[in-house]
Image (cartoon, helix red, strand yellow):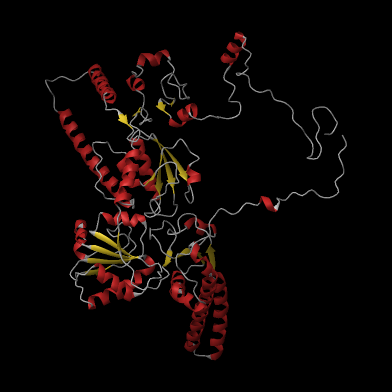
Amino acid sequence: MAVPALAGAPVLSTPDTHIFEEPTPAVDSPGVPRLPDEQIAITYEIERTVKEIRDGRWNRIALQFPDHMLADAPRVFEQLSRGLAKAKKAQTGGAGAIEGQQNGTAAVGALREKLETNAGLEENKEEEARLFILGDTSYGACCVDEVAAEHVDADCVVHYGRSCLSPASRLPVVYVFTERPLDLEQTMTTFQSTYPDKSHKVILMADIPYSHHIPALHKRLEEAGYTSLFPTSVVHNPSSPLPNRTTPPDTSNDKSALLDWALFHISAPPTSLLLTLSSRVASTHIYPTTPSAAATAPTAEAANTRMTLRRRYALCTSLSTTPVFGILINTLSVKNYMSILSHVQKTIAAAGKKSYTFVVGKVNAAKVANFSEVGGWVVIGCWESSLIESKDFWRPLITPFELEIALQDDTNRVWTGEWSGDFTAILDDAKAREQKAEEKAREQRAEEKTTATTTTNGTNRTNEQEATEDLNRDGDYDSEEESAPPEFDLRTGRYVSHSRPMQQPTSTRRSVQPSSSDDATGSAPASNALTKRANGALASVNGVVSPGAEFLRSKRTWVGLGSDYNNPESEESGSGSGSGSGSAHAAKMEEGRSGIARGYRVGDDAQKH
């Protein structure tokens, strides 16, 4: 069959009717108007930023903007560049003028000035500052994006907008909170209607962009007659009883004293902060900063976190019987994130469960849904981003603090209503428990040493007696494992037999260790290969149950090419039975077509198709 000649080049582009719309929604600026050029220097603190960059002697500076501030990024870049050039020129000119005054002879002074000017040019050429705009953050906008900054080999990061103030691990950071305006008159009116008692103990707190209004508001309220107010100030300490804020003096030694204080918060705080404050202060009222069409002052609503806490506790109890956990690394910049990762892995392993570690960027439901073996996820991030409240995820996502509750025994699990997103306290508690355990172990070793030096009836135990006691102890342990109360899924009420898959089977634990006589006969050691699953048993590796292998065997419907081929035994049995089903045979390899796209040759036939 002849192929007609092409009149022109084929159309390889996609027709306009097949173009899909971009599913990513546009960024919604949260009430931040576009600033004029003269306001940029004030809002983004250009002068202070230039001074800190010059004092730090940084040459490569990364400018990190949140999505809703990227519209101002070019103008901030331009003003910072002009400010740095102006500051360097002023410093060079001032040094030259001072040197000129100190010269006694005009000729010598001119020569020295020329030499110093040339040296200064070379030095300035080496120290020329370069700015880089980070257009997209690798993780949350509240965290410093050291990953993107290291791509441009930055010496420091200038972070704009609200921040979680989590300590960075590698690079120095200059924080610019981009102050936002606030109507103090309306704020005072709302505060007075919320707290009519002027002797009420109230803490004044605001979101990072509004925190600079707290001193002025505090002064006005004191002039209005309020006597028991405490204005907070920003500190870089997420582990504080009031995260990243100062606390009243009488609560520094006793955290429970904060329960005597109410809290007035300006602007809606993140959910993690609300849950943290719910168990630390008496009450929390939130003053909204979103623009409203009403002429009256907005009302401060009381924060209610009961339903959120109940939902978080329900997630913890539902994961108590989960055999496989996934660990999501949602940050590479927060200090000590590797320490909390190691702690989480040890905690899951100590509970007899399996864990898999994943490094992801911005977490979404599509990413984590690819791993159906995982029954629950532990998010390791900053104290704000580690809490993910969404119904779009197939499996629950919890924090390291909630993991500690989920893995507790039913008799020891007590929900006090306390919640924390900062993992520094978890590491401190774990370190304190390790020190206490080490002290107890040293005391036990000292007691055993004292007991060993004391002779009883002048006789010593034989090796056979010691082996018998060890075997009895192992038997008691096995008996305790078998007589342990069964575990049930609180959601379905069904018995869960694989809640702790990483524990060794009872038969493996009870097996007697090979003696010296067995070694002499050359008996083979236990195999390290993947063992075949027997009826009623789970697949295991090295004598330990493997959840991944078991899931692959029992629940995966497709396990790869050639999965329809079983083994030679089944092939022989199938051929002997004469069934002729051929289910045990692998597909025969056949030679496919070859040639270019407009002409094919099949096999040895030279004819084109």
Seen at 35% across and 16% down, the residue is 516
Q: Residue 64, can we see it?
A: no
Q: Quadrant of the C terminus?
A: top right
How many callouts does the rendering have?
0
Foreground of the two, 235 or 225: 225
Give how far across and how far down residue 528 sits, in percent: 45, 25
Depth check: give the residue in front, 135 or 301: 301
Q: What percent of the width, then of the height, locates residue 488?
A: 32, 31
Quadrant of the rendering where the N terminus is positioned: top right
Q: Seen in the image, is 344 located left or right of residue 10? A: left
Residue, x 47% and y 69% (percent of image)? Answer: 57
Query: Relative to 322, is 290 above or below?
Result: below
Residue lying farthest left? 457
Q: Position of residue 373 (x, y in %)?
A: 45, 35
Whether residue 390 is visible to the viewer of this picture, yes or no, is yes
Q: Residue 299: x percent and y percent?
A: 31, 67
Residue situated in front as seen by the camera: 337 or 348: 348
Relative to 529, is 228 above or below? below
Asked if 23 appears above or below 235 in the picture, the reply is above
